[in-house]
Image: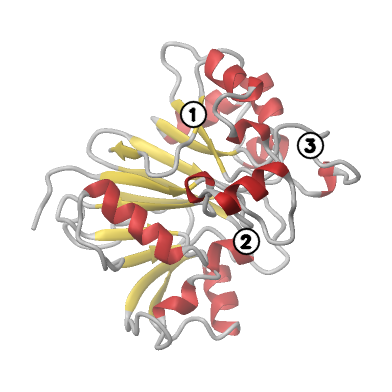
């Protein structure tokens, strides 16, 4: 049954470890253990097509929670199942839910799974591909994940620790706007150089982006005492804000996702979250619905 619009639900906003993170006794993780409303799941998105079809981007271990958030946000019955899956890369927090499609849980078969050939090869090598019909996708090619869904995907290559597979952002183009889902990349200089862009705005303009869900793993380099954040490649929110400055009239909307449990911007009342808002950008909220 058709629904008349394309809707993307933000199913998780945290880095791969989520909040609370295993083995952590920081204030935020302890609070989230005590209060489920403070929990933040690993980053993922769910897209509903105009025909009512359901398309999952990323498959983390929080899959049951993601599906519950998705169904509640769109007023659907519990027990929904994705019609397709799309993956950005093979780091554990983005694929450790694939096994739940198998006989131990959903017992699915032949679910179309879209990813680069490198990602599919890695998944097959780990023995995770059996519930899926894996379909390798070339970067830069627009394709519909299912007939009649009313939107298209395109994989956008970005540099990010490709020891097991390459990494692609996902562009989602609907009837009204396009969303760029970029949960991970190593740094802005490499990403912009890869695409021949002089700045973030120029790159977004070339992609036709109306909304960007951007890697916001860390706030700044001082965030993890005793650890060198530069050895965990991600652009910090502080750097991204420094490159963007204040939002201009024709700028796309930017929402930060993939935030580590240590990131102070996770607290909406924090000074850091206030700085993001003051510049005209935002921190993504779990269960938000974006219409394309």
The percent coordinates of residue 202 (x first, y second) are 54, 25
What separation in Å lies between label 2 and label 3 (alpha carbons)?
Answer: 27 Å
Nearest the eye: 21 or 4: 21
Nearest the eye: 39 or 131: 39
> How many neighbours does mark 2 have within 10 angstroms: few (below 14), some (14-19), or many (20 or more)?
many
Give the label, 1 or 2, closer to the camera: 1
Which residue matches tag 3? 223
Q: On the image, which quarter does residue 259 sit in?
A: top right
Which residue matches tag 2? 166
The percent coordinates of residue 238 (x first, y second) are 70, 26
The first of marks 2 and 3 along the sequence is: 2
What separation in Å lies between label 1 and label 2 (alpha carbons)?
Answer: 24 Å
The first of marks 3 and 1 along the sequence is: 3
- Circle 3: element type: loop
The residue depicted at 42 percent of the width and 11 percent of the height is 249
In the image as oriented, which residue stretches furthest toward the right?
Answer: 226
| Residue 109 left/right relative to 278 | left
Q: Is residue 284 above or below residue 41?
A: above
The percent coordinates of residue 180 (x first, y second) are 45, 40
The residue depicted at 65 percent of the width and 20 percent of the height is 271
Residue 245 in sight here: yes
């Amino acid at each position: 049954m058709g629904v008349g619009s394309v809707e993307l639900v933000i199913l998780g906003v945290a880095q791969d470890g989520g909040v609370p993170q295993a083995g952590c006794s920081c204030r935020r993780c302890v609070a989230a253990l005590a209060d489920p409303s403070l929990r933040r799941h690993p980053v993922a998105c769910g897209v509903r097509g105009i025909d009512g079809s359901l398309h999952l981007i990323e498959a983390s271990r929080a899959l049951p929670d993601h599906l519950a958030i998705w169904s509640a946000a769109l007023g659907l019955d519990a027990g929904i199942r994705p019609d397709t899956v799309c993956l950005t890369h093979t780091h554990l927090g983005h694929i450790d839910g694939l096994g739940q499609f198998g006989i131990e849980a959903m017992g699915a078969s032949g679910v179309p799974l879209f990813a680069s050939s490198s990602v599919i090869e890695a998944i097959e090598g780990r023995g995770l591909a059996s519930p899926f019909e894996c379909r390798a996708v070339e970067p830069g090619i627009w394709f519909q994940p299912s007939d009649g869904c009313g939107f298209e995907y395109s994989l956008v290559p970005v540099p990010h620790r490709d020891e097991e597979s390459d990494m692609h952002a996902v562009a989602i183009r609907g009837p009204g706007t396009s969303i760029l889902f970029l949960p991970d990349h190593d740094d802005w200089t490499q990403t912009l150089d890869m695409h021949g862009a002089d700045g973030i705005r120029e790159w977004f303009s070339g992609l036709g982006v109306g909304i960007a869900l951007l890697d916001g793993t860390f706030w700044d380099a001082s965030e993890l005492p005793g650890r060198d954040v530069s050895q965990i490649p991600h652009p910090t929110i502080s750097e991204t804000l420094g490159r963007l400055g204040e939002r201009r009239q024709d700028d796309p909307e930017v929402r930060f996702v993939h935030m580590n449990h240590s990131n102070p911007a996770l607290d909406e009342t924090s000074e850091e979250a206030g700085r993001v808002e003051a510049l005209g950008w935002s921190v993504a909220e779990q269960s938000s619905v974006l219409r394309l």
